[in-house]
Amino acid sequence: MDVKVGCCWRCENPIERAVACFSCGEAKYCSEICRFRDQWRHTPECEEWRPKQCSNPKCLEVSRQLMCSACCNAWYCGETCQRQHWKDHKPSCQERTQEIKEAATSLKDKFNSHSEKVVQSPYYVGNALAIDMLNLPGNELCSEDIKSTKTPKQDPLEASYSILSAGCGNLRNWIHTVTSLPNGFKGTLYTVLNDFDPYVQARNVLQLYMMTTYSDDPNIAERITTIWYSLHLPKEDYTFLVDCLRSLLGLSADDLGEVTGEVLNLTEADMCLMRQVWKAWLELECQKGHTNYIDLQEQRQKMLYENQEAVVGIKMYKKDLPNELLPSFEEYDKHGNFISRAILRSRSPQYDNPTLTGYRYMFKSQVTIQEILTFGRLVYCIESHLMPFGEWDYLKVKKHHYNKSMVVMFHSFISDQIKQTIASIKAGAQRVSVMICNCLDLSARLDVESYRFDRIFTSNIADLTGTQTLLKAMKPFLNHENKCSTVITHYQHWYSFIPFAITGGPNTASSTQRSAEMVSCVKLAVRDIYSDDEEKLSRLDSLATYTYEECNEIMERGLYSFQEYFNNMVSFVSYLRAEYLAVNKDSQSTKPPSFQKVKQSEGLQLRDFRRGNSNKVVPFRYRYNARLDVNTIRGMERMLEWHFA
């Protein structure tokens, strides 16, 4: 659950006297009103976490049940009931087993093919919400863990912590982690930012350089935010950017460490790779009207609107936005400017932003990092589904500073996050190492005996390599001395390998069961959305007569969020079992592993998401409707946590 411990699961306010869900006891609320309003959103969670009823219709006992290890979708009070029910259960059980085997075959092909490819373009803008990779309050500062972490006599607020961000992408996760450190933190946070892409890391180092060497400039945070996201730049910001790039070109890795007060640590080899990127950016003609002008506006329009999939995606995004935010998004969509209104009124952005350029290739064979740097000319390279509004949690953004302009609102929030980060840097609480390499090859760059991390965040690399391959590479770097040490794995595309992992879609009408399933989810979604509107809620009885076609009509009005109300937990378990079977190539068995075996991968223990709200660092999944679809999540992302048993 994506709400802080001790806060209401509906309104997120601190709880003085908790009201728990009657069925599972896991969900906590500040009042009966919030419990009532959240009951429909909470339904699929509650189904998983509440006491199970025996699947044998002759028994139906509700107690501690044993899960069918073959399908993970039936529960029995004992062997007798399981045997009695086997004849009826057998078809669905075998169907699930076959589904896992077929998914494993597809995943094996995917993982093998990925070893010969790299990403299509640099991820200057991320594909997931920023997270707190450390979360001290839920871990080292939590009363149940405080005696077992670090050295018992050491105050967790005065201790030092290390984070490895593998496949880090841009700086959003690091910035959010820094700004989430609790008040009174007096320790030091050591972070290794690792990514295979030299363009991404060149941009990260540029921004870190700005934060450290211009920390006394009162406008530096706003300037960095504009350079981070805006297609066009005012002259002052462009001149500042050029000055920083030129300065970086003249520095060695040792020099960079010195001028940043030893905050930044790089090798000369990595610095050399990034110099090629900085030099290429400086060589671009960015002023409008000049010969050889790069014209990113034209490049962006072609990229967005000559791609039918992108056109449909933007149309759907606009349809789901709250009406008061739509005009500001349309303005951003048209021009790509991520600049505060005051600056736009006083200074015309006459320069293109060279740091939004990079490569756009899908490499068909394995290439070196140096080869990536020499592929063709630099072009605008931000994918259509990647936007500033998809990186930062709308619930936090609007609480910080609500404005009908999405750009004003998000620009203000991000700038404040950067200001807080700069303050932490100036206080001496931050040390950052930046590395360019494949995270699976980190052992060649980092001495396992010298580098032990309290948290290892792996982005969605598991989608590309398989969880076990990733855990095998990361486990040696996990800090044995801290019992809160955690490896976090993220999954975004898992559902495409498991039939019926999502509900709805073009084939639903052909199946009575699937059609009824979607209608049920739509009913829950509508009730949840209008739970605080008594007038609309009173009309919902008519939903009982809704047909499949009428549900589609509702969705055409913008209700694309009904997936949040579909319990696909067993499908995700099937995916993890299929993935395990696909990755373990040495095994001669074609029998899907048990979920228990998956949970104990590579000597690490999975926090079991089927037994309650068990994650301690990051949410297992995010609420979709709570964010009004301002964020670009689709409700299918999942995050797992692995720790030493």
Image (cartoon, rainbow, N blue to C red):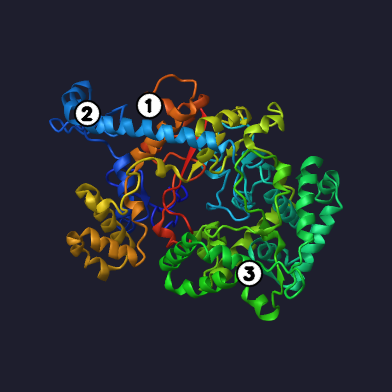
How far across and how far down the image is residue 620, in percent?
Answer: 45, 44
What's the residue type where badge 3 is placed? Answer: Gln
Q: Residue furthest left?
A: 58
Q: Kindly identify which residue carries mark 3.
A: 297
Q: Residues within 10 Å of mark 2 (few under 14, many from 20)?
A: few
Q: Is residue 159 visible?
A: no
Residue at left offset 78%, top offset 50%:
276
Residue at left offset 56%, top offset 72%:
334
Q: Kindly identify which residue carries mark 1.
A: 592
What's the residue type where badge 2 is placed? Answer: Lys
Separation of marks 3 and 1 at Cα, in angstroms:
51 Å
For mark 3, give the secondary structure.
helix
Q: Quadrant of residue 49?
A: top left
How far across and how far down the image is residue 423, in percent?
Answer: 71, 56
Q: Is residue 65 above or below residue 348?
A: above
Give whichever of discs 1 and 2 has the lower sequence position: 2
Q: Residues within 10 Å of mark 1 (few under 14, many from 20)?
A: many
**Whether label 3 touches label 1, CB < 8 Å:** no
Separation of marks 3 and 2 at Cα, in angstroms:
59 Å
**Whether label 1 touches label 2, CB < 8 Å:** no
